[in-house]
Amino acid sequence: MNKSRESSPTFFLETDDLTEEERSKAKQTKKGTSKDKRPMDSNYLDETEEPAHTIKFNLHFDRGIRNVKEEPAQQDREKFTLKRLFDAVSSGDVSKLQGLHEYLRKNMKRLTDSQYKSNGKTALLKALLNLKEGENDTIEHLLEIAEKTGDLKNFVNAAYTDSYYKGQTALHVAIEQRSAKFVEMLVKKGADVHAKACGKFFQPNQKTCFYFGELPLSLAACTNQPKIVDFLMDNPYQAVDDRKTDSHGNTVLHALVSIADNSPQNTEFVTAMYDHILIKSDQLHPKIKLEEIENKERLTPLKLAAKTGKVELLKHIVQREFPGCRHLSRKITEWAYGPVCSSLYDLASLDTYEENSALEIIVYGSEIPNRLKMLQIEPFNKLIEEKWERFVKRMFLFNFIVYVIYLFILTAVAYHREAGKVLSNSKGTLKPPYPYGKEKNGYLLLTGHIITITGALYFFVRGMVLGEIRRFLVVYIVFLIGFSAAVVTLLDEKVPVKGRSFFVPISEKENCTRPSFKNIYFTTLELFKFTIGMGDLEFTDQYQYKEVFYVLLIVYIVMTYILMLNMLIALMNQRVEEMSEESTNIWKLQRAITTLDMEWILPHCLKRRLRSGEEKDLGGEQEPDRRWCFSTKNGYLLLTGHIITITGALYFFVRGK
């Protein structure tokens, strides 16, 4: 009987002690409230009351009948409004809340009434958002008052109601504030450890947002708080269910994958937290396979890391090895001798034998970032090589031979057909093959071929050359124009001396004007010639301040011809090396695509026979752990590299001697 009473909903009618003047002001405030996105908390904007229409009981309905009037000063002194309450908890001064419990009891109010909410934000949320050095004495006082008024559970679990921060509770805020003290206090008071903050601010693919998985456990994990994670997973009040998912179906492990960004610092904390939660979950719930839970896109954390290009986290997951927890390891070292070791990799969710595998996601995901790097991770690299060597290269050779035979037959038929003979039917129309001449169809075909060839050449030049040349040209043009203007400004022509000369023939070109360095166009052209080594200094004999010209010329040649051209050559060499390395990775990707295409056309019976790896029991006699594993021998490449390095150094030493 008691259980049914506790589970049944409780009806509560809010009371209203506002005067007519206060009600009119409140209506005007609600009409002027902006619908734009508001900050989560601010001490510089007025908080608005809950705009929802609520039926309330007027406590002063009989004052007009009884002609009872209360002094305004006394009324303002005793009344706790939303602004007064929020200002008090923001300051952290408990003395400002003196008389709050008596006022609530006298007027039959609660701290969760709509009068004390702003878009769902209660005084508890306001207090937690205004911690000073991790403390706010008003929080405990508010919880005591809520407990005395019988509204503790609703008060602790009150959440934002607006579209941006919907679902965020006091527990979320306490975790974000990194306050283990208040997290423990709220959980002890009955806070919901599975509350979901599902507003727009907490969703992925938003410009200004923070997606952490919506759940309190995910928030603690994504903000790197292992102590709070341990408390939430194992506490005597209400432990979290780590299998719980958010609105996207993501668990806490999915959330960690989502916030990874491949930077060293981020990767270090994400991998450490990932392993910590995995081990903790296994200790508390050994039968739960947390890493195998899929989200709504049918992606496990491993597959999500592959699809989103989190190469460092993916590498850690597939190469994870726990010496004390072999059943949680995906890599098991069989033996090691010096730099050589043999390892077993768990192929679950990796090999293409399973549907929607990580390898398939990487190879066919054309928009996935870092997929060329992910294919170099072991065991993906060795797995593709093993498939190629085992059966794909024979299938590829067979297809190649068939294609060559097809081309030979087609060429022979085309060679022996009657050339130059136009075939036509009884209606006078042409039959295939159609001849092409100087007609619209012929020109259209020629234009298509030209566009195809030049288009490929354009993308090659744009990707390889224009990036470096564009930056070089901008800097070079600035230098060229600057030095040209300096030469034109500083050089002055000598005034020609006119005199009489005897027995000297008059040249016909005496009256012709010769180009001079006072002309900006001529100066720019001459400096450009100096850049390519074709400059001429003969024209400088007729100018004053020739030393200034020589200084400018030397500086210009050093800056452009020596430095900038060599810098361009170095950039081009670097670009060629990058393209060469990238082309190697692209070739490996193309071979991986070919390998998976060849494997896809095989019937299921052959796929089973040609499946990579072998089944092995990695557990003990009491707890068998049978998994499909792939064996690799790492270290041969390292050993070969050491041998080449030593013998190479020895070779050059002997040759020099």
Image: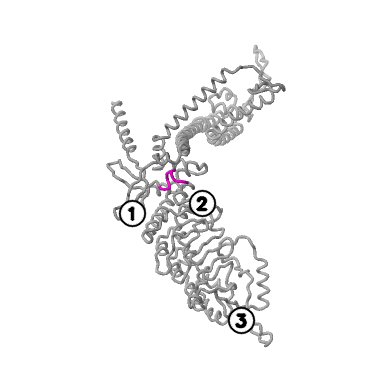
Secondary element at tag 2: loop
Residue 352 colored in magenta in the image: yes
Task: Residue type at mark 1: give it.
Answer: Cys
Residue 188 on image: x %, y %: 44, 71
Q: Which residues are magenta?
A: 348-355
Q: Nearer the viewer, residue 398 or 656?
A: 398
Task: Count residues near mark 1 (Cα–Cα under 10 Å), then give few for <14, some for 14-19, many for 20+.
Answer: few
Q: Residue at x 50, y 43 (%)?
A: 365
Q: Tell me the residue at 68%/85% (across/down).
A: 64
Give yes or no for contact between labels 1 and 3 (Cβ–Cβ under 8 Å). Answer: no
Q: Which mark is residue 325?
A: 1
- As measured in the structure, the alpha-carbon distance from the residue carrying label 3 to the one carrying label 2 is 58 Å
**Residue occupied by mark 2:** 297
In the rendered view, tell whether residue 203 sits above or below residue 451: below
Toward the viewer: 578 or 160?
160
In the displayed structure, 468 sits above or below 290; it is: above
Q: Is residue 574 visible?
A: no
Q: Which of disc 2 and disc 1 is earlier in sequence?
A: 2
